[in-house]
Image (tube, helix red, strand yellow):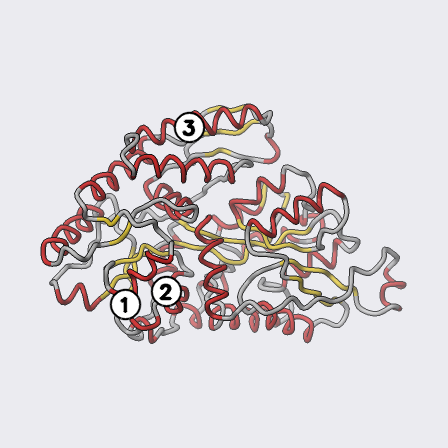
């Protein structure tokens, strides 16, 4: 989900959605419940970079008397994680509650500094979230995070370009290639999309691997140090060979995916499609505002006609650290800021998240609710785009991440770059990836075996 880091950070800056940190009081000193009540509400420090989060915090604080949130914007993505890891190792300086992306959870969790929120009622929420998201945030009865948003993938396309060149909306990857060929023949300056390497491309490509049926890792915190790693399976190689053909035939532009040049191409009409996550519609409307009304959403092309295989690109959750002095209250904050808690504050928070922050909910009452599913977007010609993305979320199946995901993503980026540059075969790039990641995992003390299919 590297692109999720970069995209969300850039989008937030572009839209001016990230407000300055609220600051606030440190967590209350430890003591019994009566002492806490006598000294006022319990203060819970939260690190998060969600867009429009200031309004969500204000909403929570206005609806809770005994618990108040003190928000700190400690950085976006890896900037926050670096500070978090330092604080956890030092035993001081970590927040009570912290925003962590799904793919980072195993890496943070192996430090053994994330609280099992199942001890404080979090298991009550198990049925309240999309199953694929809950599985990534928990391990059996242990709950290490409360899901917030996800990134099920779909295809955003320029309707004006498709209409001009009489391109059928592709339902399969074969049809997608045929549309690319027809577009390139009609106007060589245009491409169906871009496919190039960048640090942000790894999460996007992993989402396409996911859709193709690749399951690169088998991971459970309870079974450490055993980890399954298979990064060069037939399904991942199928995806790489497909895009190798698209790039070599000049049907896909080798411009790096998720870079400023790529997003400029979406605005100029150089690219006719954007293979996007559930948060993509909001992001696209900010970086390509001049194209409002020209875009539509359609399901991600399938490998088999009539199939329903889906992939996800991004997602995040709230975890509680073991440095909190108020685990019960911190768990309540993690559950109720965007969750399905007993108070009505979560409904108001999700209205902010949907309307202003473009988050894609994983809480089923929001995900399946009429407000989200029936929301129209003028940027997409008043299309109800979530009616495309929600079924994509419903079709997602289990997917595990590794406790060395940063290294794996960096290596995927490097090997993809070698393939695009013609310095290795695209299939061979995955073989090298498998070797490098497997060797690294063993050096870190993990016992590596082949990943098991989900």
Above or below residue 104? Residue 45 is below
Q: Look at the numbered disc 3 and give the secondary structure of its residue.
A: helix
Q: Is residue 428 above or below residue 183?
A: above
The residue that disc 3 covers is 434
- Distance (Cα) linking label 2 and label 1: 10 Å
Q: Position of residue 281 (x, y in %)?
A: 37, 65
Circle 1 residue: 295
Query: Is 263 positioned to the left or the right of 126 in the image?
Result: left
Residue 447 in the figure: left or right of residue 429? right
Relative to residue 18, is residue 203 depicted above or below? Answer: above
Instruction: Give x and y (percent) for residue 4.
Output: 46, 53
Secondary element at tag 2: helix
| Closest to the observer, 322 or 137 | 322
Camera-nearest label, 2 or 1: 2
The picture quadrant where one finds residue 435 is top left
Q: Which mark is residue 136?
A: none
Q: Residue at x 45, y 43 (%)?
A: 398
x then y, percent, for residue 263: 34, 60
Label disc, if present, on residue 284 of the rendered structure: 2
């Amino acid at each position: 989900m590297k692109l999720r880091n970069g995209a969300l950070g850039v989008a937030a800056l572009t839209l001016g959605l990230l407000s300055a940190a609220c600051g606030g009081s440190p967590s209350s000193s430890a003591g019994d419940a009566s002492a806490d009540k006598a000294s006022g509400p319990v203060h819970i420090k939260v690190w998060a970079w969600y867009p429009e989060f200031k309004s969500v915090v204000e909403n929570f604080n206005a609806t809770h008397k005994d618990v108040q949130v003190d928000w700190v914007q400690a950085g976006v993505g890896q900037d926050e994680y670096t500070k978090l890891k330092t604080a956890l190792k030092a035993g001081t300086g970590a927040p009570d509650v912290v925003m962590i992306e799904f793919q980072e959870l195993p890496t943070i969790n192996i430090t053994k500094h994330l609280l099992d929120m199942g001890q404080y009622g979090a298991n009550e929420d198990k049925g309240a979230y999309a199953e694929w998201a809950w599985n990534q945030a928990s391990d059996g009865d242990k709950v290490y995070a409360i899901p917030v948003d996800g990134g099920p993938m779909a295809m955003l396309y320029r309707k004006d370009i498709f209409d001009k060149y009489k391109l059928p909306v592709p339902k399969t990857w074969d049809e997608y290639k045929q549309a690319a060929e027809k577009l390139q023949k009609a106007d060589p300056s245009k491409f169906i999309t871009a496919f190039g390497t960048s640090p942000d491309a790894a999460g996007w490509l992993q989402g396409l691997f996911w859709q193709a049926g690749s399951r690169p890792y088998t991971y459970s915190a309870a079974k450490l140090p055993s980890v399954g790693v298979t990064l060069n399976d037939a399904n991942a190689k199928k995806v790489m060979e497909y895009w190798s053909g698209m790039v070599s035939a000049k049907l896909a532009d080798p411009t790096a995916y998720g870079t400023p040049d790529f997003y400029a191409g979406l605005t100029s009409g150089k690219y006719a499609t954007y293979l996007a996550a559930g948060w993509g519609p909001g992001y696209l409307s900010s970086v390509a505002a001049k194209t409002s009304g020209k875009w539509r959403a359609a399901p991600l092309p399938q490998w088999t006609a009539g199939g329903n295989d889906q992939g996800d690109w991004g997602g995040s959750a709230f975890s509680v650290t073991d440095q909190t002095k108020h685990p019960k209250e911190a768990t309540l904050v993690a559950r109720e800021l965007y969750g399905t808690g007993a108070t009505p504050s979560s409904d108001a928070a999700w209205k902010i998240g949907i309307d202003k922050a473009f988050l894609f909910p994983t809480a089923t009452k929001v995900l399946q609710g009429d407000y989200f599913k029936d929301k129209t977007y003028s940027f997409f010609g008043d299309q109800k785009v979530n009616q495309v993305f929600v079924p994509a979320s419903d079709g997602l199946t289990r997917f595990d991440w590794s406790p060395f995901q940063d290294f794996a993503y960096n290596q995927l980026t490097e090997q993809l770059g070698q393939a695009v540059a013609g310095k290795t075969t695209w299939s061979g790039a995955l073989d090298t990836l498998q070797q490098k990641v497997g060797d690294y995992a063993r050096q870190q003390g993990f016992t590596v075996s082949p990943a098991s299919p989900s």
